[in-house]
Amino acid sequence: MVVRAGDNSLHAGWLNRAYEDRSFNLVVSYYSESAFSSHTAERGVRAVLVKGGKWDGLYHTLSAVSDLDGYRHVWLPDDDIATDGDTIDRMFEIAGNYGLAVCQPSLTHDSYYTHFIFCHCPAFGLRYVNHVEIMVPCLSGSLLRRALPYFRETMSGFGLDYLWCRWPESGPFRAAILDDIAVHHTRPVGSQLRHAIMAAGVSALDEEAAMKARFSLASRIVPLAYAGITADGQAVAGQIAMGWRMLRSWRSDMSSFRDRRLARRKTAQVLKRQLIRRLDLSLLDEREDGVPG
């Protein structure tokens, strides 16, 4: 695990289990000098100070990890994610068992979110999707090596989520939302590292546009689920079937949402997209995949 951490990072809560009892190591890449100076050494945890945004900072941090090839999966969460060691261990276990190249935990119903489809859906253990967010992505070692050069060019990470579900390493049935687990995103979307990005005079939308232009992507990708495994292990196939199953599941658990009226509207929006949006699972053209200079 590698986290870009500031003064209010929640990563201490991820280490609630003894080092011997967890399956992961943690690199804390501080962008805050005060947070770095307050770091307490702990077994299985490395701390570095790297200025910049989340993704350019991750590039410099990961490039300096000499044993990176020894890890099967690497999780790159924001530092405002509330979770624990059991949940993280389970995430890595599921990713390995299903051979996933890129995945993310679902979000608790009291989380801040961008796309409602990533909220925890109780009917499922796992949903296969065409899109994994930049908030909490877990990448396989091979996919991370493919994606890492592109981290260098972006502070915000906008546009990376258009790429890592559409390379040969991460084609159909290798990208998923993990509903077997859920994490709490505790602060409004986009609040992390915003000041560092603004101070650098960088526009996240411009970074997204540049990434899309490099790969000749004409439009925004709408997150869709096209298959899944239910909580009791049954397979569900098809975009429409997934839409109705997700709707029923969320509607049956509506009392757990902080804003029920908004949640009802968002569930209807997800269903509409599942019914009418065209799913594109084509892989990116290799000719467009020049490594950044």
Image (cartoon, grey):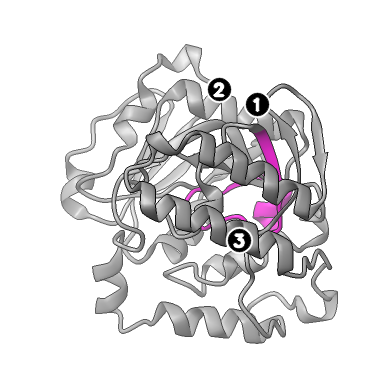
Q: Position of residue 225 (x, y in %)?
A: 70, 52
Q: Which residue is mark 3?
A: 148
Q: Which residue is mark 2?
A: 23
Q: Which residue appears at 55% of the width and 61% of the height?
A: 269
Q: Considering only vertical position in the picture, is 70 above or below 136?
A: above
Judge by depth and name the residue closer to the eye, 72 or 237.
237
Q: Considering only vertical position in the picture, is 101 above or below 160?
A: above
Q: Which residue appears at 35% of the width and 63% of the height?
A: 190
- Nearer mark to the viewer, of 1 and 2: 1
Residue 70 visible in the picture? no
Q: Amino acid at mark 3?
A: Leu
278 magenta-colored:
no
Q: Which residue appears at 64% of the width and 87% of the height?
A: 213
Q: Which residues are magenta?
A: 125-146
**Dividing the image into 4 quarters, which one contains the C terminus?**
bottom right
Judge by depth and name the residue closer to the eye, 38 or 279.
279
Q: Which residue is mark 1?
A: 93
Q: Secondary structure at mark 3?
A: helix
Q: Position of residue 2 (x, y in %)?
A: 46, 44
- Count the marks: 3
Q: Considering only vertical position in the picture, is 278 above or below 70?
A: below
Residue 216 visible in the picture? yes
- Disc 1 or 3, which lies upstream in sequence? 1
Q: Amino acid at mark 1?
A: Glu
Q: Secondary structure at mark 2?
A: loop
Label 1 packing within 10 angstroms: few (<14), some (14-19), many (20+): some
Q: Check if mark 1's residue and mark 2's residue have beta carbons within 8 Å.
A: yes
Label for residue 63? Answer: none
- 63 left or right of 230 in image: left
Judge by depth and name the residue closer to the eye, 184 or 276.
276
- Disc 3 or 2, which lies upstream in sequence? 2
